[in-house]
Every structure is written in C-alpha cells, then in structure tokens.
Amino acid sequence: MIWKFDRPILIQGIDQPLALSYLQELNLNNEDIIAGIVENYLGEKLENIPVFDLVKEAINTYPNINTTLIFSSPYTVLDAGLEAIETGIKQIIINTENVPPLDLLKLWQKAKDNQVKILGNSQAGILIPDRLCWGVNNAHLFRSGKVAILNYGDSIISNELAFLLQQNNLGESIVVNLGNEQFIDIDWDLWLATLEKDDSTESILISLSDCTNIELEKFISSITQSCSKSIFVYLLDPNNLKNSIRNNKAK
C-alpha cells in the first residue's frame, strides 16, 4: 500500500482560522482544492471554493475526491474523520493540533478497519515542489530536487532542512510533515514504500524531533527492510532534553 497523490482534495473545517491562513498563503490559486466543509459558515462559497455542510454532499458533486485535509477544531476531528471514511475517502491528512488522544485512537482503528490511510495529526501535510501543496506552509521555500524529507516534529524543521539542502545545491522531491505531537501513529512502511516507488526520489532524509515517542524497533525494521534507497536519519534532540523538560526534570 502506498500514498496516492490524486490531485483533487477536500478541506474539512475550511472556515477555521488555520485553514483560512493556509488558503491565503496559497494566494487562492490551488486548483487541487475543489471543495470544502464548513463548521459555522453559511453560504455557497468561501474564498471562491464551493462549500458544503456534509462530506456526502461534496462527494456527490465531486466524486473524484480521494483525499481530505482536516483543519476542523480539535473536538470535532473525530466526527470529521469518521464522516470522511463513511463516504469512501481513502486518504486523510489531519493538520489540527491538540486532538484528544482517545479520539485519535478511535479514528485510527476505524481507518484501519476500512483500509484508509491517515497522516498526522498536528501540522501534518504533504508538498511536492512546483506540483502540489497540501497543508504545508511556506511552500515557496522548497525547490524541486531528488531528496525526500520525512519530518516528525514541528513543520518549521522541514523548512530549515530545505534551506540546508539548497545551500548544497540540492532540492526536494517530496516533503511529508508527519505530525508534531507526542501521541501519534506513524506508518513508516507506508511512507518508505511510497518513496521507494517514486522515481524522482534518490535519497531520503528522516528528521526525528523526539525519538522517545516512536516505536524504535518498528522504525528500525522499516528503514532496514522497506526501502533500498539511501536513508539519512537526523535526530534533533539526541539527549532527550524535550522529554526531560516536559517531565519537569530540567528544573
């Protein structure tokens, strides 16, 4: 199973502040976004994008949508995800932060039962330079190239890595922000299999801001068995300072 980069996408919670900021950064010129679901807005369009109250209504109008980008408020993400799954959407990107962990567990289980792929939550997104931008800010900072970035941590880290690559005359084939919260499920096999089949990717840079939050044995097994391309792992916090501070030990 790999991630499919089908162009038409849906935005759930398109009237939320983060979604509006994302749309404005794109200069309202992203043809991939063909419909939105609103939480509070009443009307037929928002920022020139047709909006609906229900995912089913959007899919009936645009049946070629296979991917949804969720900006819904934290306590409505579960309902948004379940609604997307029930209407047949097979790929979900959750950009929303601070989603209740129990809600994520329920959503991941439902997705697994229905063979639905989930990316995120918290700052999750995908970018292919000069081709598509799904939930990634500062798209202008990235340049087309041969290095794929898988970033588990704050999305700004992928920006810094892109800048580092450009200083060495390198660019990015695909950038995937995996999320930025302690409670997250990362399907390493899925993403490495996707990059393995991507002809534009020659090497893979994996950035881990906090390796204590991932299943290390699963991660190591994935990078040693799932992909034949060169993989570089960058540990942002090798001394685990972030976890120490969070546990109040630093004082």
Image: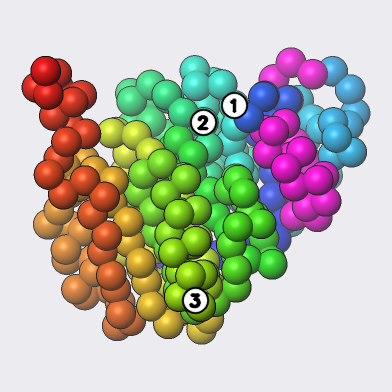
The colour scheme used here is rainbow
- The residue identified by callout 3 is 170
Check disc 1 and give the amino acid type.
Answer: Ser
Badge 2 marks a residue whose secondary structure is loop
Q: Which mark is residue 72?
A: 1
Crowding at mark 3 (Cα within 10 Å: few <14, some 14-19, many 20+): some
> Left or right: where does residue 56 sit relative to residue 228?
right
Q: In terms of sequence position, does the residue under pointer 3 or pointer 2 come before the other?
A: 2
Task: Give x and y (percent) for residue 155.
Answer: 46, 45
Task: Give x and y (percent) for residue 176.
Answer: 47, 56
Crowding at mark 2 (Cα within 10 Å: few <14, some 14-19, many 20+): many
Range drawn in magenta: 19-41
| Badge nearest the viewer, 3 or 1 | 3
Determine the residue positioned at 67% across, 24% down: 16
Q: Which mark is residue 96?
A: 2
Is the residue 204 above or below the residue 99 in the image? below
Gap in Å between the C-alphas at discs 3 and 2? 31 Å
